[in-house]
Amino acid sequence: MNDASHLQRLEKQIQEIKVRLLALGDMRPGSLSKQYNVCGKAGCRCKATRNPKRHGPYYQLSYVHRGKSTSQFIRPGMVKTVKSQIANYKRFRRLTEQWIELALNLTKLKLAAAKKKEKNDSN
Ligand SMILES: [Zn+2]
């Protein structure tokens, strides 16, 4: 493959990433965990000696933003939405990683092309 078509291919791939980024829906970072708790009430089913039934599940979302880790409870009715937001965030990260990779290759290629041209012009 020559430089020009390689360059074109990289630019096309970057364009496709931009389109996919625009199509992303709501997103949020984090991971969702499910928890069961034991309460303080005497004689509660969660502390039964035989077959105890702990309370829950409770869904907790944890994430780090600007170096600060946060966690929050998610209502059961919101779990599906939050899962889809997390999946979108992962897609977002993957796409931007790919974009960076392509951008680095593209700048390298453009620099090499500019050097080649400079050399040809001076001859
Ligand atoms: Zn209990």
Image: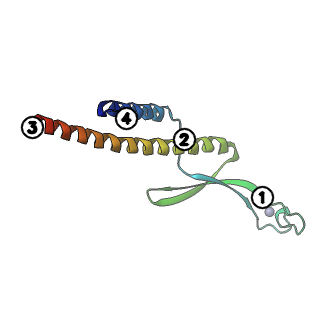
The residue depicted at 45 percent of the width and 60 percent of the height is 67
SS assignment at label 1: strand
Q: Position of residue 46 (x, y in %)?
A: 82, 63
Q: Is residue 85 left or right of residue 95?
A: right
The amino acid type of the residue labelled 2 equals Asn
Q: In the image, which disc is placed on residue 35?
A: none
**Callout 1 crowding tier (Cα within 10 Å): few <14, some 14–19, many ≥20:** some
Disc on the earlier residue, 3 or 4: 4
Three-letter code for the amino acid on which mark 1 is drawn:
His
Badge nearest the viewer, 3 or 4? 3
Q: Which residue is mark 2?
A: 88
Tell me the distance, in whole angstroms, between the alpha carbons under discs 3 and 4.
28 Å
Name the disc covering residue 55, or none. Answer: 1
Percent coordinates x, y for residue 73 in the rendering: 63, 53
Is 49 drawn above or below residue 10 in the view shown?
below
Mark sitting earlier along the chain (2/1): 1
- Is label 3 in contact with label 4 (beta carbons under 8 Å)? no
Mark 1 within 8 Å of ligand 1, using the beta carbon: yes
Question: Which kind of residue does numbered mark 4 sit on?
Answer: Leu
Q: Which numbered disc covers residue 122?
A: 3
Q: Quadrant of ligand 1?
A: bottom right
Mark 2 / mark 3, whichever is N-terminal: 2
Q: Nearer the viewer, mark 4 or mark 2?
A: 4
